[in-house]
């Protein structure tokens, strides 16, 4: 009789535990930080961030499932925000864990059963941060203009800074191929660059070789924001940049106009690179506006540049435009 009773008790205990683990509750809580509540997010089991991080690391997963991200952040049983005074309401299992996070604050997590039982009021603490460097220098003490070959460009985690930044920050390392201004004493240079949501083709790190402009400000080497030209080898061994039809109207110079250039045969651009299954009309639009026949020759779906500016003239053009914009 005893073995049967013991077995029954064990089964009953398992059923009770399963019921407890699956029990869903709706409860209210409070979360704040030193500045109030703006920007605080609450996630059940860190589901949203785990999904996002996996998508950023796994391009195949992102391509197949990214449309589900929007569903996750709008599912109030998985993700929510507190109101203006810190109150929040969420429905979840007692065994679930709530994650409370905010940019530049240390994430905190608690079991829901502990929040309910102990009436925990969450108070997020500011993460340790690096003070933003103060620099009131308007003009660079030195200006390095050079052809650079990319060695490495990496993103910098700006959340470590105490102040808010609207720009993305990059650490760049380049080999100096040819100089045009102040002489840099080393063959390789490391500098910082900032960008604010530029289109892909207007981000210097996406090119192997660039004519780039680096200033020294308060002892730091910083790219003059957005200032660079992608450059390629010509058949006579010089550096030059094909005509950028979007930017060309802004280069109002009578002296430094595009000239005929024989680029190395490897310098071609895929006309249909950014368009899948384009219509005939789309192809004609690309040829007309991005690769006009005045500046490019189209062969077998490739745009071959036939006009541009040599690096020396690009530097002079840049200086002329900079002088006009003072």
Image (cartoon, helix red, strand yellow):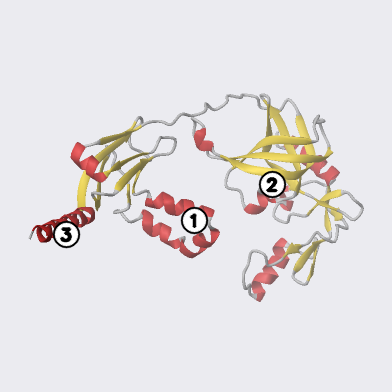
Residue holding disc 3: 11
User: Can see residue 321?
Assistant: no
Q: Residue at x 85, y 43 (%)?
A: 312
Cα separation between marks 3 and 2: 66 Å
Local crowd size for mark 2, using a 10 Å CA cut-off: few (<14), some (14–19), many (≥20)? many
Labelled disc at residue 240: none
Element under disc 1: helix
Q: Disc 2 marks which residue?
A: 204
Horizontal and vertical percent position of residue 148 = 77, 42
Nearest to viewer (mark 3 / mark 2): 3
What residue would you read off at disc 1? 55
Q: Is residue 266 above or below residue 101?
A: below
Q: Within 10 angstroms of label 3, few (less than 14), some, or many (20 or more) residues? A: few
Front-lying residue, 115 or 212: 115
Q: Nearer the viewer, mark 1 or mark 2?
A: 1
Which quarter of the rendered picture does the C terminus lie within? top right
Please state the horizontal and vertical placement of residue 61, each as a whole percent of the image.
50, 61
Mark whose residue sits in front, 3 or 1: 3
Front residue of 155 and 11: 11
Which quadrant of the figure contains the N terminus? Answer: bottom left
State whether residue 183 is above or below residue 268: above
């Amino acid at each position: 009789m005893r073995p049967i009773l013991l077995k029954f008790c064990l089964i009953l205990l398992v059923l009770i535990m399963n019921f407890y683990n699956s029990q869903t509750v709706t409860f209210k809580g409070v979360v704040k930080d030193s500045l109030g509540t703006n920007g605080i997010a609450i996630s059940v089991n860190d589901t949203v961030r785990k999904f996002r991080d996996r998508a950023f690391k796994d391009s195949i997963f992102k391509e197949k499932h990214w449309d589900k991200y929007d569903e996750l952040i709008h599912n109030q049983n998985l993700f929510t925000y507190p109101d203006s005074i810190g109150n929040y309401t969420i429905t979840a299992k007692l065994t679930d864990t709530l994650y409370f996070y905010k940019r530049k604050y240390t994430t905190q997590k608690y079991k829901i059963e502990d929040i309910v039982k102990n009436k925990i009021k969450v108070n997020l603490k500011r993460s340790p941060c690096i003070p933003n460097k103060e620099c009131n220098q308007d003009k660079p003490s030195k200006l390095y203009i050079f052809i650079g070959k990319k060695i490495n460009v990496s993103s910098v985690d700006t959340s470590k800074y105490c102040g808010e930044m609207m720009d993305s920050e990059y650490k760049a390392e380049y080999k100096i191929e040819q100089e045009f201004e102040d002489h840099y004493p080393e063959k390789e240079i490391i500098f910082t660059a900032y960008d604010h949501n530029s289109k892909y083709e207007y981000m210097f790190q996406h090119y192997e070789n660039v004519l780039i402009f680096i200033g020294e400000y308060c002892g730091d080497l910083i790219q003059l924001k957005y200032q660079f030209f992608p450059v390629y080898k010509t058949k006579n061994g010089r550096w030059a940049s094909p005509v950028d039809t979007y930017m060309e109207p802004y280069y109002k110079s009578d002296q430094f106009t595009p000239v005929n250039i024989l680029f190395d045969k490897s310098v071609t651009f895929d006309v249909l690179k950014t368009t899948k299954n384009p219509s005939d009309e789309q192809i004609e639009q690309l040829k007309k506006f991005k690769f006009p026949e005045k500046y490019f020759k189209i062969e077998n779906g490739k745009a071959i540049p036939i006009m541009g500016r040599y690096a020396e003239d690009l530097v002079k053009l840049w200086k002329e435009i900079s002088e006009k914009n003072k």
